[in-house]
Amino acid sequence: MDKIEHIGIAVRSLKEAGSLYETLLGCKSYKTEEVASEHVITEFFKVGENKIELLEASSADSAIAGFIEKRGEGIHHIAFAVENIVEEMARLKAEGFKLLNEVPKKGADNKLVCFIHPKSAQGVLIELCQEI
């Protein structure tokens, strides 16, 4: 794994959270994007090399809506950048990690992604990201 790619934060409202993070970070978001397959709208902020992804559910049956219902707003996942997502998935699977995806899928911010189940990562949802 090369670096932390971003930290994902589940929010009820991108409008409210986006405004808060603009003030907190002292910058505007650089991208808002819908990921229809995940029923989520994302907004990205970048400060130096660090990125924050805000995630708002676009439907009541999305994973983000379920997360907020169960746990409230807050940190949803930590994403790591990888050079070769397929090789990294195979390595982690061989090490006993439970992958939530059998093959990488298209994610936000021009990335291929795969998630590692929190039960195999000390309760933390981990996302692997490879630049497309």
Image (cartoon, rainbow, N blue to C red):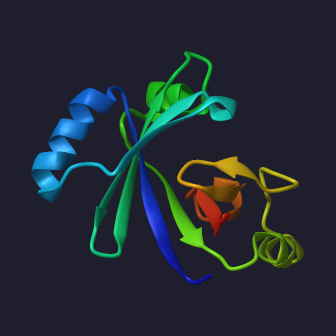
Corner quadrant of residue 117: bottom right
At which x and y percent is residue 102? Answer: 88, 54
Question: Is residue 129 left or right of 18 when viewed as pictured?
Answer: right
Residue plotted at (48% across, 38% down): 33
At which x and y percent is residue 41? Answer: 48, 33
At which x and y percent is residue 95? Answer: 83, 78
Position of residue 127 relative to residue 82, above or below, is above
Nearest the eye: 112 or 79: 112
Nearest the eye: 38 or 75: 38
User: Which residue reaches farthest top?
Assistant: 60
In the picture, the quarter occupied by the N terminus is bottom right
In the picture, the quarter occupied by the C terminus is bottom right
Residue plotted at (77% across, 50% down): 100
Position of residue 122 relative to residue 87, above or below, is above
Nearest the eye: 105 or 73: 105
Question: Is residue 25 left or right of 111 when viewed as pictured?
Answer: left
Question: Is residue 54 left or right of 81 when viewed as pictured?
Answer: left
Residue plotted at (60% across, 61% down): 126
Corner quadrant of residue 114: bottom right
| Tally of numbered tags | 0
At which x and y percent is residue 81? Answer: 58, 73
Residue plotted at (11% across, 57% down): 26
Position of residue 75 relative to residue 131, above or below, is above
Question: Is residue 39 left or right of 9 when viewed as pictured?
Answer: right
